[in-house]
């Protein structure tokens, strides 16, 4: 029989505090994971009753009529009155089916996915959720898969990489081909300056008849999620996109699997350096979010058998 894989020695250039952190994670991370049905059911139903992502996570023409006021998630003093023009960019009704999905994969963008061979396992989920228009294809298939049912789109990508969609819009629309007919969730109501570019994204998608289905996060939902987790110990910061999608999955999916959530600079088992993203090393807004605290929460949910966090390689 093959001999068990040895843990590599600790590298001398490991970041300060990383060894203690990794040792702590290894102790708490149970590889022989088993779903604890009661814990899962409790949390899922609390989220359903207190945050109601099922009806409220997405702005629709049914839940946000013309004339209503939207309060910005990160700028509470700013509001936006829904005009008929803005209303016309909302999807008609709730995009989520009444029935729960069986297995969902939520894919964060951490470099921990590099060489993970998790692509096949990710794609085998009934519903695959990805964050912030990540790179797909280009040799990443084996490690991150290709299937996408829901993808979020951060306005900063459109502002930084597509000129705010003020010029030619074809390159942006073509970049969406890799997500097929998925639901694309934009976040126009966190910061007021990002509303126009998100509206332009919807117009561009419609003008070019792209099959992707654009829709908007509801900032009220962010607010109730923040309160929900604050009362359970997550003290600081706006929730990261990845954590928001985990919450949506917990309401809608019987089995929730997470990949690509690892906001630290060395791999927990292989110990090699890990980039912030599997496709680049751009740093996130970690002053705004509280990534290590969020990771701690995900690890807790893993230990409680509520969801399964995949940290190692999938082969
Ligand atoms: O822009 P933001 O930091 O929210 O996200 P991102 O870098 O595009 O990655 C998507 C999600 O994956 C984040 O919101 C985090 O929840 C998660 N992530 C992580 O856990 N560790 C990393 N090194 C990078 C992302």
Image (tube, rainbow, N blue to C red):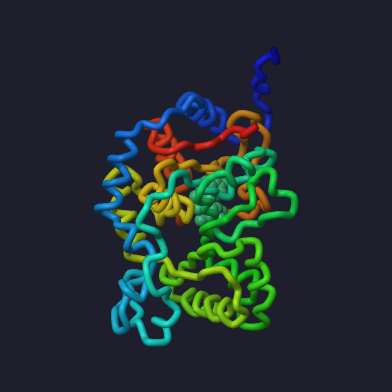
Q: Nearer the viewer, residue 47 or 94?
A: 94
- Quadrant location of the C terminus in the rendered image: top right
Residue furthest to the bottom:
84
In depth, the one of 281 and 219 nearer the eye is 219
Tell me where residue 71 appears, x and y as whole percent. Answer: 33, 72
At x 35% / y 76%, what residue is drawn?
Answer: 61
User: Measured from the top left, where is residue 314 in percent x and y?
Assistant: 62, 34
Q: Which residue lies furthest to the left in this view?
A: 49
Residue under the image location 54 percent in, 30 percent down: 22
Q: Quadrant of residue 73?
A: bottom left
Residue 292 lies, in percent from the top left, at 47, 42
Q: Which residue is drawn at 68% across and 34% down?
A: 272
Left or right: 195, with 136 as reference point: left
- Relative to 246, residue 185 above or below: below
Is residue 103 visible in the rendered image? The answer is: yes
Looking at the image, residue 219 sits to the left or right of residue 117; the answer is left
In depth, the one of 163 and 145 nearer the eye is 145
Residue plotted at (53% across, 64% down) = 154
In this view, which residue lies farthest toward the right? 139
Q: Is residue 44 above or below residue 302?
A: below
- Vertical side of 69 occupied by 160: above or below: above
- The answer, for residue 285, to whether it is visible in the render is no
Give the number of callouts.
Answer: 0
The quadrant in which residue 1 appears is: top right
């Amino acid at each position: 029989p093959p001999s068990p894989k040895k843990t590599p020695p600790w590298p001398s250039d490991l970041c300060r505090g990383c060894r203690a952190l990794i040792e702590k994670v290894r102790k708490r991370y149970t590889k022989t994971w088993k779903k604890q049905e009661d814990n899962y059911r409790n949390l899922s139903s609390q989220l359903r009753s207190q945050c109601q992502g099922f009806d409220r996570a997405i702005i629709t023409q049914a839940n946000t009529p013309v004339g209503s006021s939207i309060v910005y998630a990160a700028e509470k003093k700013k509001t936006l009155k829904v005009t008929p023009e803005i209303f016309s960019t909302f999807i008609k009704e709730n995009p989520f089916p009444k029935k729960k999905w069986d297995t969902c994969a939520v894919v964060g963008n951490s470099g921990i996915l590099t060489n993970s061979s998790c692509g096949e396992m990710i794609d085998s989920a009934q519903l695959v959720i990805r964050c912030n228009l990540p790179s797909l294809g280009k040799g990443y298939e084996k490690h991150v898969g290709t299937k996408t049912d829901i993808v979020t789109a951060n306005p900063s990508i459109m502002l930084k990489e597509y000129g705010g969609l003020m010029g030619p819009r074809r390159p942006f629309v073509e970049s969406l081909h890799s997500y097929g007919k998925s639901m694309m969730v934009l976040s126009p109501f966190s910061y007021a300056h990002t509303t126009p570019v998100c509206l332009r994204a919807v117009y561009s998608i419609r003008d070019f008849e792209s099959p992707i289905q654009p829709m908007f996060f509801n900032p009220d939902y962010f607010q109730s999620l923040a309160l929900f987790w604050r009362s359970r110990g997550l003290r600081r910061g706006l929730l990261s996109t990845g954590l928001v999608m985990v919450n949506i999955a917990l309401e809608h999916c019987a089995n929730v699997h997470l990949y690509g959530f690892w906001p630290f600079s060395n791999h927990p088992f292989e110990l090699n350096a890990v980039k912030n993203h599997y496709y680049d090393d751009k740093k996130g807004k970690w002053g705004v979010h509280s990534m290590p605290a969020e990771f701690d929460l995900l690890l807790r949910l893993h230990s409680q058998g509520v969801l399964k966090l995949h940290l190692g390689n999938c082969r």
